[in-house]
Amino acid sequence: MIGATRSLLLGLVIGAFLLAASWTWGRHRVAYECETIATEQAREEHIRELVGVTYMSEFGVDADTARSYWRSIRRHCDHDPYLVLALIAVESRFDSQVVSAKGYRGLLQTRHTTGHPGVDIAWGCAVLGEMLDRADGDLTKAVSRYQGGSRHDNRRVLAEYARIGGHEGG
């Protein structure tokens, strides 16, 4: 009887140990997977930022200004930042002081600009978001509406978007 009790107790202790070890291992595995996902997301975002900064440098934008624009785009836009970069490239060639013949100003050629690129990006992103909503997410229609129906500029924006690495529906 004592031997059976010892065996039972030993079995319970071993079972408890294995359960605790399994739970701990599982907890660590989940933590590791979450950390890995966060690391992969951070790495992906860093790569996207590098692509964006490199793209802007083609237009003569210095690295600090490009990173500032990138942060503003990421803060104010819920859609693909590459689409915003493509719009800026076509609308202003990244010249924050440019004024169109119709009186539109700044990076994204909006009516509501203060001359501050961050504010211009916020306004442009809001307008683009509204155009995407009105077009039920149709990128071609949204970009066309953003630009007042200009098919030529629409094609240029979509070509730039594809060149940066964006994709329709991004």
Image (cartoon, helix red, strand yellow):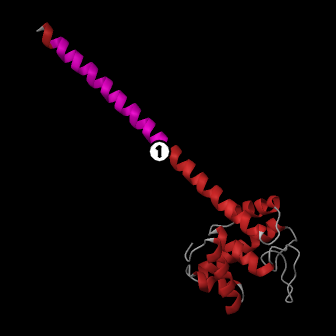
What is the count of numbered marks? Answer: 1
User: Which span of residues is magenta-colored?
Assistant: 5-32
Residue 11 is a magenta residue = yes
x, y percent for residue 94: 80, 73
Camera-side residue: 28 or 120? 28
In which quadrant is the C terminus drawn? Answer: bottom right
Residue 134 sits above or below residue 62 on the image:
below
Q: Is residue 48 left or right of residue 107?
A: left
x, y percent for residue 145: 67, 86
Q: Residue tagged by mark 1?
A: 33
Camera-side residue: 45 or 62? 62
Q: Is residue 48 left or right of residue 68?
A: left
Residue located 65% across and 87% down the image:
155
Q: Is residue 4 left or right of residue 144?
A: left
Residue located 48% across and 41% down the image:
32
In which quadrant is the N terminus drawn? Answer: top left
Residue located 22% across and 20% down the image:
11
Amino acid identity at mark 1: Glu
Helix, strand or loop status at disc 1: helix
x, y percent for residue 104: 83, 83
x, y percent for residue 14: 27, 21
Camera-side residue: 86 or 130? 86
Residue 9 is a magenta residue = yes
Residue 147 visible in the shown view:
yes
Q: Main secondary structure of the magenta part?
A: helix
- The answer to which image quadrant residue 111 occupies is bottom right
Residue situated furthest top in the rendering: 2
